[in-house]
Amino acid sequence: MLETKPDTRLLNDAIDKTQGYLLRAQADEGYWVGELEADASVAAGYIPLMYYMTGKIDPAKQAKVVNYVRSKQNEDGSWSTYYGGPGDLNVSIQVYFTLKLAGTLPSEPHMLKAKVFILSRGGIMKANTITRIFLCLFGQYEYSGTPSIPPEIALLPNWFFFNVYEFAGWSRETIMALMLVLTNKPVCKVPDYASLSELYIEPEGRRHFIPAEWGGSFWRNFFVLADYTFKASEKLPLKAFRKKALKEIENWVVEHQEADGSWGGIMLPWIYSLMALKSCGYGPEHPVIKKGMEGLAPFLVEDRNTLWMQPATSPVWDTAWAVLSLIESGVPAGHPAMAKAADWIIREEIHSDGDWKVKNSHTPSGCWAFEFHNDLYPDIDDTAVIARALLSLSENPEKDKDKILAAKRGLNWVREMQSKDGGWAAFDRDNNKQVLGQVPFADFMTPLDPTSADVTAHAVELFGKAAPGSRELKRAVTYFKNIQEPDGSWYGRWGVNYIYGTGLSLVSLKSAGEDMSQDYIRRAVKWLQSHQLTDGGWGETCKTYDTPAERGKGPAAASQTAWALMGLVAAGESSNPAVSRGLEYLLSNQNADGSWSEDAFTGTGFPGAFYLRYDLYRIYFPLLAISMYRNSLEAANG
């Protein structure tokens, strides 16, 4: 067991090993990027996508996808949205269809178990909107059972209460593609052996309709009624603006393709944009389709036995945190690896305008996105941590002028993206019209981008370093006080969950210059302490997004333990026995190569529906936490 203050030699050894791991993991170009894993439906989706777009798939690749998704099946026959989670109906339906399309016999034991699970959850009619649209594309569901999205919506001006720019960026790109799909209603015929008729409980005549969900909010009822109205209007012969709207949407989708062939650098709008354009007559040799299909290759992770598809890639995010953790751990800013990282970061800066400009017409560009190629959708999270990383790499005002100027542009962009409530969202400013949260497809794809504690925390750390005492900083501190949970924690939108939100909030409040002895901060400290596990670590599952009462509960994970420790150290708790126990957990579970093992999904895409495992979270966050602790001891000792 470690004493109250861990042996400095143990800390130094752990830090040295993880520094070495990260430095070895740096790409020659200067960036870091870890694998980004989602649930099995994303991996499985490669087979139907290839079938839809090309009519075939390489048998060897298909077999590897099947191997991968089979390895993720639960004992009860289901597939989950996150590691260790309960079976999920929608993921299970999509994977089951993929396996049948790949030629797996429904009589095989694992398929029979999957079928029993799906039927026990109500079958296809209980699936969410995205799953039902997916099945429509392959003739396994009727379009009459999906929500209508009239393409004429695309013609509404940006000042109108309801227009496409009121949706979050990821929603907007997907919705634009879905308007083409749901209007054109394409169907890719599949062999009879791929039929999903056995997954219906309802009689034939009652299968394909939108399940009524009357009750609840006025706006939920409004959208249900509106859908009935839209469907009735489809039978009318004259649709004055239909042709113009479809052409405008088609052009919009084409114009929003990124340099690597993706849409927004993420898989959901990418897949539906390809399918939508094919439904408009775009053939396999069309430059847009060709670039989109070829661009998939870097997103595939393949070994001898398995193949799976990443939902996105995270080089900018990973590089920022790798740099910050290495600098905190003592790697000098002039180290060759840091110089390479800085050069790559500066090359990745986005100087063009994207969709964010619609609500921020006077804001100059100077920002970063999450992915390699995503010029239209930079985000506040990445820009804030990248700008802070650049400042940490700037030692000489003359020599490092390019870094400092780039960081200042990032700071200015983040400043202009602050929302009215004092917080920051991920992609847009004031993107939170609650009425739109009741649209039918919100059952999977979060349509709004409200402010959150974790994104705000990253912005505040940047302002604490580059603009202390600023008005933006003061407004953000008030925001934190307003949104704190009654038990003292903060909700984490983009990381799992209250441990992420609470740990990051405390670090940022320290950076903002807050007195860490204040009552609201002590309540957060108490919350973290009370949720430490007996093994010394901290852990929390994705279940907390559906069941907040489960917050702070789950098996210990290296990344979540690091977040808790970072928060406690920032709050001045370095001598707290809870910190020693947390450090002991990290030190005793470190691998010989300096890494930590972690299967848990501690990243969030869509709360309640879609989660992520960032492979490098288990590396740079523990390094950052241990280094912050060591540095706090050194500061205390003069």
Image (tube, rainbow, N blue to C red):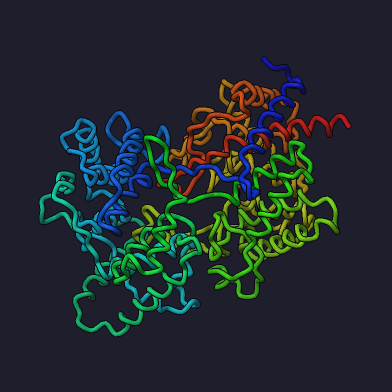
Q: Indicate left or right for 623 with 638 as reference.
A: left
Q: Reply above or below: 574 against 417.
A: above
Whether residue 563 is visible: no
Image quarter of the N terminus: top right
Say if residue 1 shows up in the picture.
yes
Is 535 left or right of 467, judged from the image as shown? left
Residue found at x 28% / y 70%: 183
> Residue extending furthest top?
1
Of residues 7 and 563, which is closer to you in this image? 7
Whole-percent x, y for residue 110 in the image? 24, 32
Q: Nearer the viewer, residue 478 or 64?
A: 64
Q: How many numbered circles does the render carry?
A: 0
Where is 436 relative to 67, above or below? below
Q: In the image, 470: left or right of 195?
A: right
Left/right of residue 612 with respect to residue 185 in the rendered view: right
In front here: 395 or 531?
395
Question: Residue most toward the right?
Answer: 638
> Vertical placement of 91 versus 530: above or below?
below
Q: Position of residue 397 (x, y in %)?
A: 85, 57
Q: Residue at x 59, y 40 (%)?
A: 489
Percent x, y of residue 74: 32, 32
Q: Residue at x 37, y 45 (%)?
A: 43
Q: Quadrant of the C terminus?
A: top right
Closer to us: 201 or 98 = 98
Where residue 92 appears, as percent x and y from the top left, is 29, 42
Residue 308, by quadrant, is top left
* In this view, 193 is above or below 630: below
